[in-house]
Image (cartoon, helix red, strand yellow):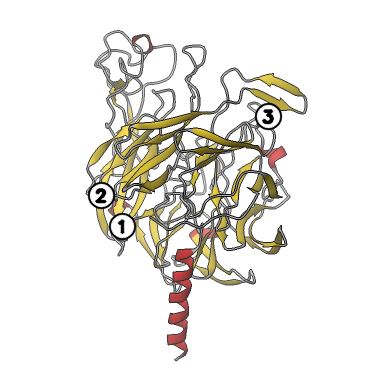
Amino acid sequence: MLKRLFVVTIQLAAASAALAQWPQFGANPRHTGNAAVTAQPLVKTLAEIVPDPLVPEEIDPFSGDLYVHYAGPLLDGDDVFMSFKGADYVHTVWSVHRLHWENGQLVEKWSQPSDWQPIPDGNNIWEPVMQPVLANGFIYAPASGGTLLQIDRTTGTVVRRINPFSSIDANTFVSGPPSVDSAGNIIYGAFRLQQNLPWRNDILGAWLVRVTPDGTPTAVPFAPLVPNAPSASAQCTTEFAFGSIQHPPSPDAVAPAKVCGSQRPALNVAPAIAPDGTIYIISRTHFNDRWGYLVAVNPDLTPKWSQSLRGRFHDGCGVLLPPENCSAGAHVGVDPDDNLPGSGRVQDSSTASPVVLPDNSILYGSFSLYNDRNGHLMHFAANADYLGAYPFGWDTTPAVWQHDGTYSIVTKENFYGDPLLRTDPGDFITQLSPQLQVEWQYRNPSRTACRADGCVDEEFGFEWCVNATAIDARGTVYANGEDGILYAIAQGGILLNRFPLAGPLGAAYTPVAIDAQGRVYSQTGGHLFAVGGMPARKHAVR
């Protein structure tokens, strides 16, 4: 009888979690970032909290930028669950806090530390994100050794540590935000680094992990999920050496190769889960970000298919790149850095995660250097066919607005190129059709940066420092910029409001979220802001 009651309780909790407004990165298992309510007008700051008090120490002294990735808040009713850092920069302790709306104030109810630590710095990696998820009536927080802490959402007490491995090895890391499917299963990647020179030595193992609602973990080896990848000891094409020689060195030059390394999940990537239970995750070779894959896995963790991101683009020399940017006689369309068709690169400093669209096709924002570091937003069908790409994809997880029997895709589009070489095209929030055609764009209008030491003109404007926008039931888009402003942009690219959060900062890319009351949550400079003005209206889910 007790066992039956426990099972019924888990089932009800799973159903409740599936209805939570924003229980994970990207709001739902598909990561579409949309809410079923109309967001409140951006009238006033309802609350401001400081999850990261270490920002003054974390700002890079040379660039003034903040190289940290932050978790998105988890929202359910009047509860807000958020990752925090301790106040000690040398021995930082991460924790999860429960905040609750009481009499218009966001009040802390509990905090629970985790022994999670970020993966050791290497390859110019930004600090990875510590992102919990809300499922089955609990909070599941990443912890040491590739484990999860299951935390009671009401009291903050640790119910158990869920360990899919035989022991706890501090060199095993949760690779990115876990995701939770509609049945309450938690999915995440993990891999084990060598303790000495972890970025020069190959990994010691990688896994895809599933935790069922009753807490049972299963970890399957990662390499068999990517059967079309080269072996760990194979040679993988890399790039020509950087220097004074124009690329490619000659029209038929062959780029050098180096040992590939093992397949592993990319850092900061949250798996996406389709309605049929198919899991999508991004893989890469440990030593070479030019060898990446979109991996589809069946609900029972068996391989479904794997598609390479290599050689997909023909928009390099003579297309996106003017002739003077490539050596004389270069073949049209090649990436000048390896003299091959462009590839979707999987950089560990990105937070881009797959998105499952309403037609069950999949988007992934990959990196590419040759098109001014803009990357490509790659599109794959559910049967693994490659459908094309939009020429911006860097560090973006697009949101989706369903309307009128179809849908639209909302992403950011920043300008990263050298302003001395060409005219600044601007930094945009861009809405695309299902065929990745532009429907409208809104350009960030900010040009003046004011700090404590005065104001200066930012000639080339401010980036959108948002890695995942949010969309309300009307199709209004919410995004934050490096100007420290939260924007509400109506359909058609019409500005509804600009709400200042804080002064401009070379800020970390952060997600936006909307709760069931229509309050909008945005971050800048290590602060989390809740913004609104009046209660939201609920809309029927389309």
| Label 1 – label 2 distance at C-alpha | 9 Å
Q: Residue at x 43, y 42 (%)?
A: 398
Quarter of the N terminus within the rendering: bottom left
> Dot 2: what SS?
loop
Residue 378 visible from this viewpoint: yes
Q: Residue at x 47, y 39 (%)?
A: 350
Q: Is residue 8 above or below residue 309?
A: below
10 Å neighbourhood of mark 3: few (<14), some, or many (≥20)? Answer: few
Q: Are marks 1 and 2 in contact (CB under 8 Å)?
A: yes
Disc number placed over residue 61 in the picture, else none: 3
Residue mark closest to the camera, 3 vs 2: 2
Q: Which kind of residue does numbered mark 3 sit on?
A: Pro
Quarter of the C terminus within the rendering: bottom left
Residue beneath disc 1:
278
Q: Are marks 3 and 1 in contact (CB under 8 Å)?
A: no
Residue mark closest to the camera, 3 vs 1: 1
| Label 3 – label 1 distance at C-alpha | 44 Å
Disc number placed over residue 382 in the picture, else none: 2
Q: Are marks 3 and 2 in contact (CB under 8 Å)?
A: no
